[in-house]
Image (cartoon, rainbow, N blue to C red):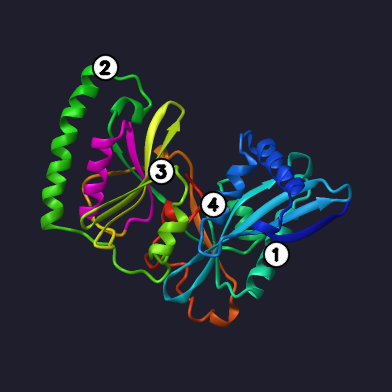
């Protein structure tokens, strides 16, 4: 049974194929995605207004597998595509090279269109395959930082009500102490070589969905999203900046705002954090919900010497706002 691999831009996909993509997602992951959600979500939330979709069809025109490269503009004129939204339908999973064929087709098209680097955050089941077969480079596992609001829900344990009450009493002073510390010792995230270009075009496109809350107040800007995680109200902190720079002060402001203005049980920041702070706790590996390995691959071989430091995590600013999660 052979297969046909095609690459289409988001606006080139017809309704029949969109329905096959939706069915493939829901079959593969037991999700409840919708055509509208896919067509108007992450794939078009970028300055290009589209993504690159690789689709594998069998001889009966059934969709076998799917992967997407979504464009992003990085600083220093680096054009990046983010790999994700991958599935291989269950009955085709014995075709072990199918995913590699999708990646190969996407790389060829995106290289022709002038993109420099491919990044991705594959799941723990596919990271070894992705590294060995698709030849991506592993950079670093992304970290989880949490500020509990409800201690029992954050820990997913039934604690005495007194413990939760005491924690709530401690939380306010904890934030105020960190506010004072951040004024004296305000750690800032310095420019890194591989960093999303955070201009107004980026914010207007990346966070145009109504799921995201954007707040601008004085020198501060923050973006977060509320999400129900099996009965726990989690505020995913996508970005926080003071005068355009991610910093300890900005993190304190954002956390205080979310605590005061939402019913969050916890605030979660996922990504690389390159500044010192005392507000949020970094989760140990045994407590993280799932592994998120950052990977990369150089598409533009003409710039390969320029990107010889690409596997050094100190050269990356990478967090939830850089890929399609929450």
**Mark 4 or mark 3, whichever is nearer to me:** 4
Q: Nearer the viewer, residue 13 or 193?
A: 13
Mark 1–mark 3 Cα distance, whole angstroms, equals: 33 Å
Q: Nearer the viewer, residue 171 or 11?
A: 11
Mark 4–mark 3 Cα distance, whole angstroms, equals: 28 Å
The image shows residue 229 at horizontal and vertical percentages of: 45, 32
Residue 324 is left or right of residue 204, and the answer is right
Please give the residue where the numbered disc 4 appears in the rendered image.
Answer: 42
Query: Which image quadrant is residue 245 in?
Result: bottom left
- The kind of secondary structure element at disc 1 is helix
- The stretch in magenta equals 248-273
User: Which label's residue is closer to the chain start, 2 or 3?
Assistant: 2
The image shows residue 326 at horizontal and vertical percentages of: 47, 44
On residue 285, the disc is 3
Please give the residue where the numbered disc 2 appears in the rendered image.
Answer: 160
Q: Kindly check if marks 1 and 2 are in contact, taking CB atoms under 8 A apart as contact.
A: no
On residue 196, the disc is none
Please give the residue where the numbered disc 1 appears in the rendered image.
Answer: 104
User: Which label's residue is closer to the chain start, 4 or 3?
Assistant: 4
User: Which label's residue is closer to the chain start, 2 or 4?
Assistant: 4
Q: Residues within 10 Å of mark 4 (few under 14, many from 20)?
A: many
User: Which label's residue is closer to the chain start, 1 or 2?
Assistant: 1
């Amino acid at each position: 049974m052979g297969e046909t691999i095609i690459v289409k831009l988001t606006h080139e996909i017809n309704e029949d194929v969109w329905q096959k993509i939706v069915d493939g997602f829901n079959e593969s992951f037991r999700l409840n995605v919708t055509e509208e959600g896919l067509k108007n979500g992450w794939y078009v939330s970028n300055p290009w207004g589209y993504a690159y979709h690789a689709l594998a069809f069998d001889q009966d025109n059934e969709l076998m597998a799917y992967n997407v490269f979504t464009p992003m503009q990085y600083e220093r004129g680096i054009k990046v595509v983010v790999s994700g939204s991958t599935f291989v339908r269950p009955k085709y999973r014995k075709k072990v090279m199918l995913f590699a064929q999708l990646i190969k087709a996407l790389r060829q098209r995106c290289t022709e269109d002038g993109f420099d680097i491919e990044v991705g955050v594959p799941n723990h089941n596919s990271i070894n395959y992705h590294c060995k077969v698709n030849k991506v480079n592993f950079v670093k596992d992304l970290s989880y930082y949490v500020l509990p609001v409800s201690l029992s829900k954050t820990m997913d344990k039934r604690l005495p009500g007194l413990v939760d009450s005491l924690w709530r009493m401690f939380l306010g002073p904890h934030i105020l102490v960190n506010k004072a510390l951040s004024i004296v010792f305000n750690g800032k995230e310095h420019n890194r070589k591989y960093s999303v270009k955070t201009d107004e075009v980026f914010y207007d496109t990346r966070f145009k969905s109504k799921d995201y809350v954007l707040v601008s107040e004085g020198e501060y800007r923050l973006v977060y999203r509320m999400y129900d995680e099996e009965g726990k109200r989690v505020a995913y902190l996508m970005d926080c900046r003071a005068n355009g720079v991610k910093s300890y002060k900005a993190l304190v402001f954002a956390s205080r705002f979310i605590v005061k203005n939402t019913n969050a049980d916890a605030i979660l920041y996922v990504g690389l954090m390159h500044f010192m702070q005392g507000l949020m706790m970094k989760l140990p590996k045994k407590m993280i919900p799932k592994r998120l390995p950052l990977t990369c691959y150089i598409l533009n071989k003409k710039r390969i010497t320029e990107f010889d430091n690409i596997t050094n995590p100190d050269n990356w600013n990478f967090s939830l706002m850089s890929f399609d999660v929450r």
